[in-house]
Image (cartoon, rainbow, N blue to C red):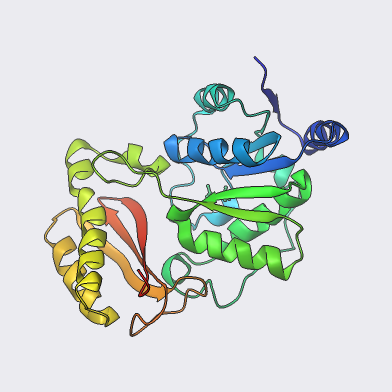
Amino acid sequence: MNIKVVNTINQTRNEIATARQQGKSIALVPTMGALHDGHLSLIQQAKKLCDYVAVSIFVNPTQFGPNEDLDKYPRTLDNDINLCESERADLILAPSSKEIYPTANFTWVNVDKLTKTLCGSTRDGHFQGVCTVVAKLFNIFMPDKAFFGQKDAQQLAVIRQMASDLNFPIDIIGCPIIREPDGLAMSSRNRYLSGEQRTQALVINKALQLGQKLFAGGMIKSQDIINKLSKMIQQQPLAKIDYISIVDKDLMHELDTIDRPALLALAVYIGNTRLIDNIVLDPKD
Ligand code: PAF
């Protein structure tokens, strides 16, 4: 096996230092494991843009709320290692919680404004946990570039803002959503779905497509689009809307009228599984 798997910050720093001495540029792909083709597309993009690709696999407890799925979040490390190996990644850091949070944590990274809408409005403290762990990972790996999926569009925008505000010398690279052939966005949480739930989950992408069609047909009032999508989703008995929202694509504040590049984003519970997806609506297209 060519890939190196380590568990500690010290080992990680040593491996990265060696790669740096060899003049290599460093990519970081932060993940929580349970890897799927979406993650692999991040690794593939990282391979294209950097000489040395590091992947972190850490189910970060601080980004889960008290009633969320931290305990049952899928942990598939052996399979994840094999997948990273077959994508020819160079390094995996798979640390324990104690390694990342050795003592009670008193320092938190909070990004204002961009975290007030969408997932930030229904998952209290989520982005504080994400930003804090990503800042830690940036300090551990000190990569040239870091790769994040557009499926978590708000996370990507928030991390871009954090990297800029805190002067991390790291390019934040956003990568497109990878979908199953029937349109369901890939997610580690899809494996929670039963057969019937999996079928009803297709309404999420169908609703986004309807939104795009309505917008292309001239509907530019956000509420009009949201009403139509709500109606469609409510027809699925196992679906419960967490939010449907249209926001400025970069700043994430809600838009009454789509008069600039916008993100149509939604979160829907299918049974107990909360799934998110989004699409860009751009008046220039
Ligand atoms: O997108 C994820 O998997 C996580 O939020 C991240 C960025 C790895 C931080 O824990």
Residue 86: image x %, image y %? 54, 22
Task: Look at the picture and state if 78 lies above or below 197.
Answer: above
Task: Look at the picture and state if 15 lies above or below 232.
Answer: above
Q: Which residue occupies the extreme front position in the image?
A: 284
Residue sitting at 37 percent across and 73 percent down? 284
Residue sitting at 77 percent across and 65 percent down? 167
**6 to the left or right of 117:** right
Res 57 visible: no
Residue 25: image x %, image y %? 75, 40
Residue sitting at 13 percent across and 55 percent down? 237
Q: Which residue occupies the extreme bottom position in the image?
A: 256
Residue 251: image x %, image y %? 52, 75
Given residues 195 and 98, the one toward you in this image is: 195
**196 to the left or right of 29:** left
Among the 4 quarters of the image, the one containing residue 111: bottom right
Task: Look at the picture and state if 49 lies above or below 239.
Answer: above
Residue sitting at 35 percent across and 56 percent down? 277
Res 171 visible: yes
Given residues 4 and 49, the one toward you in this image is: 49
Q: Which residue occupies the extreme top position in the image?
A: 1
The number of numbered discs placed on residues in the rendered structure image is 0
Task: State which quarter of the image contains the C terminus.
Answer: bottom left
Q: Which residue occupies the extreme left position in the image?
A: 235
Among the 4 quarters of the image, the one containing residue 48: top right
**44 to the left or right of 51:** left
Task: State which quarter of the image contains the N terminus.
Answer: top right
Residue 233: image x %, image y %? 18, 61
